[in-house]
Image: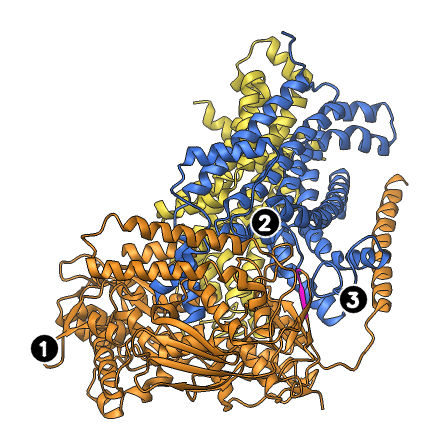
Amino acid sequence: MPERRNIFVLLISVLLCFAAGAAALFLSSCAGKKDSGKVIFRGAGSWEIPPAFHGNPWAPGGVGSASWYVHEPLFMFLPGNRQFLPRLGLSMKESKNHKKLTVKLREGVKWHDGHPFTSKDVVTTFIIGYLHHWAVWQLLEGIETPDEHTVVFRWKKPCPHLFKTRALIEKIHSPSHIYGKWAAPIRPLMKKEAEYLKFRKRMGYSAETRKEGAAFEIEKEKKAVREKLYSFKPVELTGTGPFKLVTVTASDMRFEKFAEGWAAGKIAIDEVQMARWPSNEIIWAFLIAGEIDAAHPATPKEVAEQIIKLNPRMKMVTPSDLAEFGLVFNLGREPMSDLEFRRAVATAIDRDLVRKISYYYGTPVTAYSLGIIKSQRSDWLSPETLQKWEKYEFNPQKAEEILLAAGYKRNAKGFWLTPEGKKINLEISTLGNSDFVLGADSISSQLVKFGIDCHVRIVMGQLYGTKLTSGDFDMVTQFLGDARRYGDPATVFENILGKGGYISTACRFPEEVKGPDGKTIKVHKLAKELREYLPEPRRREIIRTLSWVVNKYLPILPVYEKNMLVFITEGKRVSGWPDESHPMWSAVSTGMEGVYISFMTEGLLKGKP
Amino acid sequence: MIMPRNTGKRLLESFTIIKHNRRAFFGLCVLVFFILMATAGPVVIPLDMSQDFLMRFQGPSWAHILGTDFAGRDIFQQLVHGSTDVLTIAFATAFFGSFIAVLVGLSAGLVGGKFDMLMMRIIDIFLTVPNFPIMIIFASIFRINDPISFALVLAAWSWPGLARALRAQVLSLKHKEFVEVSRVMAMPYRHIMFKEALPGLMPYLMINFIDMARGAITASVGIMLLGLVPLSVTNWGMMLNFATFQTGAIYVPSALSYLLSPMLAIILFQYGLICFASGVEEIFDPRLRS
Amino acid sequence: MNRLTPLQKKIFTSLITVFVALSFTFALMRLMPGDIVDEWARELQVQQGLTYQEAYKIATTRLNYDPSVPLPLQYARYIGGLLKGNLGMSLNYRIPVSTIILKALPWTLFVASLALLVSFTVGVFLGMLAAWKRKGFLDPCVTFYASLTQAIPNFLFALILLVVFAVRLRWFPLRGAYDIDVVPGFNLAFFLSAFHHAVLPVVAFTFQTLGGWALSMRASAMSVLGEDFVMVARAKGLKERRIAVQYVGRNAITPLITSLAIAIGGMLGGAIFIETIFGYPGVGFFFGTAIATRDFTLIQGLFLITTLAIIIANFAADIVYSKLDKRVKLE
């Protein structure tokens, strides 16, 4: 029975493999895993795997999600109630003219390597930030240290909320005893550049050819310093934060509580373990298994319900991500260039249905297109104002009327033709993220049902920007009204209507439009003004005007406000998660891990009861 | 007019062989079923893509034989309407791919010498040069909308492996008596290739043809995600992708049908083809009949 | 001048192929359209709430590639470095490409070779049996198994394995190449841990590819079964087993060797789905980031490995043919 023998050989080898696996399983489970009684928090995050991992927060590769556990900012900003929570900073004071911001630092704070934390470390971080074009430097003139525990930010112009926040929430991650030597060569460069800018201002652009060489020189020198800095690859990740990084592998990170940390007394968590975030599908499996205590994958309704059902300890919190998902229309291309057509499209789409199908846990946006996100609407626009503005609620009949009135016709198959009699065929371009694709598909099939022929094409990330700037699209899916991090409408309108704004360039929005009273509204100018320090009434007025412009001329159509889906396990390893009303949840848009850390630092998150 | 009668007779003979082989007959039925589905299906069964949130992830019922998808749309309708493009792409890709492979592999193996060396080097380059940047370049230049050009793009990457394997087989066949006899008799290469060498390679060629066809369904998803062709939610591969990634259907018991339906269609398609191929083997090689 | 032996000739042409393939890759990478800085800028814009222009400015600092250096010069530098055995510095990470490859490749090799070995031997064996006993029970089973496994997306299958064996049964670890508590090095705990962690990735890969090998082998064996020499051997009254192995198997495996050679090269590119699902370190991760960051030197380094692997494996395959089939000369 020769074949039999072959099968035996096969069987035996398979069995041997399994035996080896079982032995390995047995031995490795015996090897360690003593229950030490430590309180452990398990999360998920991403980082560059060794050998690309290193401890220099400036160099590419590197720190990844570890930064949240190891580094701290001066203050933590809560967009929900517009409060600053003291971290490395204790208090702050603004001068009357808003040109000086003084921050008192916490005393007795130590870096993980034992060095004391001082104002010099803040300056070092910001100086190196200058080398990296930190946006705060557009307004920052200089940063001073009157003493070891005071930092003074001097502004070129009165400083608006946006820039103040930028300065205060940057993580201070470059101790001067390590990074001071990299900051030193930057100072003369700053001076040189300031002089050059002054000179250019005096002479004007055009008179300038010889000195442009100087600008080039400065950039070159900056690059040289940067490259030197990037070649610095420490193994240790040094911070002041509540946790010290102990081990990094391709799949796991492990942190230990920093016993000398300023908040160590309040922190009940002894160890943080972080699993590599592979993809949402696997995170769901981890959540069901109770493998991790908290994660925020974008999750469809049924899956979320299933997770909660299978893991009774699981809860779900859905704070806003302070951004809206929606469409950008290309005003430079037929037929999207026709306002009437855009109005028809806006009324032909059942936006709430799109939300339900593509991102159930979003907050529906059904009536307007304001630029201002839904959850912040009441901060800026009164119901009486809104009452007077045009609504774009789902109403296919109205959409039909708009199109007919504008001269559009249907062909025999029911598809819409332009007034010139050409069949309309639209394309929605979208990035490949699953919620984007589902949203685009939903919108497209609704338009087809309405009689506007439409299909979806996925665009690779690398080609997306070119597509937008070149105007080679009809509609794209995009995050609009993006007020993440600062909760400030200035960045929102800069993007949608500003000169060179990302969305305004893409949709070809004009520089000026006609206002409700027939007067011209200078859109670019207003968007720019909004970024300056303004008295509150003026600020409100501009926001109102720009919001009206967006709603009236429809360069965009928001579909839903994106909410984060945070799954938290209560009582397996940790307990004490505050409920959704806690203002700290509003900081999720500034970074999820920052919120977890804050719960720990405030002593809310404890071991299992 | 001898030819028609002759081919007619041969066809009949082939059919008898297949009819006697139970598996092959099953394969034939599956094939006919799919062809009917792709041609007559869309005419007979209307496609309603309107979305209904309350109807999503419904199980199989009389109204929806295979249930509904994440937007409350009938899965069976989508399978039927997707089949036209899916099958066209699958067969066209497999056809183009095998054709190039046979041409290159056989000629390289038979001609030998410098030509063989050149062809092998070209194959090696096709095998080694990454196709990702090429796809990006394609995606930024072309907009493909018809299934045939779609298939050509897919076929461009599927032939080199088969060509190399065919050449290897030809090299060992080359020294067999019948080929050597043909060479001594100074028969043209074309004759040696198609009349003598090819029939012996048929089983291997067919399994690769089937593999290419199935592979094309999977690969078309990648091409859609790169944006080279518009997204089609009724493409079977894309349905599977939506079920797995976009809607997380693997975790939702009620969505099982959405996950399994396209998968079963692909399994049936491939299994049917392989069964059918086992009958075709016998047509080409009478010695296998029993 | 001495005439080159066929072997030398073959080595020479293989080298030329490597050279041409690398040059192609070099050119293609740089011809890739699209604005990578834009992609980072959008990422930063979202992460840090900047305006697009602010984000774009920051993003440019990440790019260490100077497009103003003319292409021919870049090419000359690249080839020059290569000839000296220098793969260059990664543009993104600013560490030697060789460091990255040396660290990532062993894991990929470990899992890939194990998976390929198991799936190839078992697959060929099953395929052979299916062809030999064509009317038996095994043949339709193998075919159906292959159709089934090939229709299930590999990602899905690996995920099911993960959920069943790691999440539910807890027989195997959820992720990684070794336990975070063991110290990598020459010690028993590390090896055991590594094997334990490799089981699921290897099984996932094996189950997926097994069917394909079986089908190919079955088809190839069918071609051979009809050959005269099998009849002759049978007529001579040789033992069935001897015919199966010596005559049929030996001849049928020829085309599969080529596929195996190609598969080896492909596997060295890292099985990305395995690496993502099982959090396994390896070449796939770096392939992904290198393409996403336009890290030309790293991409070139990684492709050099796969190119060499494919060419060498094909080269070896040709030699194996001539050994398996005495009539085929090395040409």
**Do marks 1 and 2 share a subunit?**
no
The residue mark sitting in front, 2 or 3, is 2
Chain colored blue:
C
Which amino acid type is shown beneath numbered disc 2?
Ile
How far apart, in angstroms, are the residues tagged by discs 1 and 2?
59 Å
Label 1, secondary structure: give it. loop
Of the chain colours in the picture, the one used for chain B is yellow
Q: Residues within 10 Å of mark 3 (few under 14, many from 20)?
A: some
Determine which residue is flagged by label 2.
Answer: C95
**Label 3 sits on residue:** C171
Against A318, residue C220 (above or below) is: above
Q: Which residues are magenta?
A: A250-254
Residue that label 1 marks? A519
Q: Earlier in the sequence, mark 2 or mark 3?
A: 2
Mark 2, secondary structure of its residue: loop
Q: Disc 1 marks which amino acid?
A: Lys
Front residue of B174/A217: it is: A217
